[in-house]
Image (spheres, helix red, strand yellow):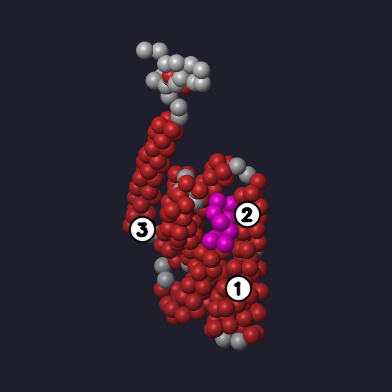
Amino acid sequence: MLNALLISFAVVFVAELGDKSQLMAMTFAARFKWWVVLLGITAATALTHIASVGIGYALGSAIPGQLITAVAGVSMIVFAFWTWRGDTLSDDESGTADRVTRSVFLAVASAFFLAELGDKTMLATITLTTQHNWFGVWIGSTLGMVAADALAIAVGALLGAKLPERAIAIGATILFFGFGAWLLAESWPELDGTSRIVVGLVVAITMIGGGLVVRRAHRAAAAVRRAAAPSDTGTANPQESTPGPGRTALH
């Protein structure tokens, strides 16, 4: 089992270097707390790789990998709109901090889970399982991927500490759209006619719906800012309306 663990760790760590998952980890870490991102990656990796070791190998080529990749691409577009809309963990939301943190964890975990299904690390895990102890392969491959993505998290956390919040949001949005386009382009040639129509409709609905949600959120935020801003009319000079020491009010 130790041999399987070490081999799997090395293979998956090397396979993950330069992969899109590292860019995703960097993006999430620049936007959210690094430990939440790391927990999400760990949970998604463990689940993905246990599927690889178990039912993934049993099903083999029967898994419609191109459809899974297309779903992952659509999910990246959803996360792009979510980031653009501006859901963040702020001081003003301290009463709901736990709920927001859980949402971030689920977002990271689901994003990595979908992105890694059918990816080369999953295929490598399946291949290793045919030759080595399954439990060692599962632990080793999970640790290998988490270690590789932890490097990207460190870089993302450093960037997050130096860049302004708005710049991070814009950059994260662009990257998520890029991830979505990448995954959709990767899966498109392998889809049949019906699947292409369905995927195209889903992407169109996602783009329209996401745009409307972002527009509504930005309008609401602008309304809140206008309401919080001091009014130029109807506010009297305190020195004129309130009698001070040694002064009397005019009747």
Q: What amino acid type should be assigned to the residue bearing mark 2? A: Ala
Q: CA distance from mark 2 to mark 1?
A: 20 Å
The residue that disc 2 covers is 157
Q: Residue at x 42, y 71 (%)?
A: 63
Residue 31 is inside the magenta segment: yes
For the residue carrying disc 2, how many other residues have a C-alpha within 10 Å: few (<14), some (14-19), or many (20+)? Answer: many
In the rendered image, residue 188 lying in the magenta stretch gets the answer no
Mark 3 crowdedness (10 Å alpha carbons): few <14, some 14-19, many ≥20: some
Q: Nearer the observer, disc 3 or disc 1? A: 1
- Crowdedness near tag 1: few (<14), some (14–19) or many (≥20) residues, C-alpha within 10 Å: many
Q: What residue sits 50% from the left and 79% below the top? A: 53
Residue 153 versus residue 189: which sits nearer the camera? 153
Q: Position of residue 121 (x, y in %)?
A: 56, 69
Q: Amino acid at mark 1?
A: Leu
Say which quarter of the image contains residue 142: bottom right
Labels 3 and 1: the sequence-earlier one = 1
Q: Find residue 41 and report its image quarter.
A: bottom right
Between 222 and 156, the residue placed more toward the observer is 222
Looking at the rendered image, the disc whose residue lies closer to the viewer, 2 or 1, is 2
Q: Which mark is residue 195?
A: 3
Q: Is residue 57 above or below residue 171?
A: below
Q: Is residue 185 visible?
A: no
> Which residue is under mark 1?
143
Q: Which corner quadrant holds the N terminus?
A: bottom right
- What is the CA distance from the residue labelled 3 to the residue labelled 1? 35 Å
Query: How far is mark 3 from mark 2, CA to CA?
Result: 39 Å
Rendered-image quadrant of the C terminus: top left
Stretch of the chain drawn in magenta: 28-37
Depth check: give the residue in front, 14 or 230: 230
Q: Secondary structure at mark 1?
A: helix
User: Measuring 54% from the left and 54% from the top, which residue is drawn there?
Assistant: 32
Above or below for 151 versus 27: below
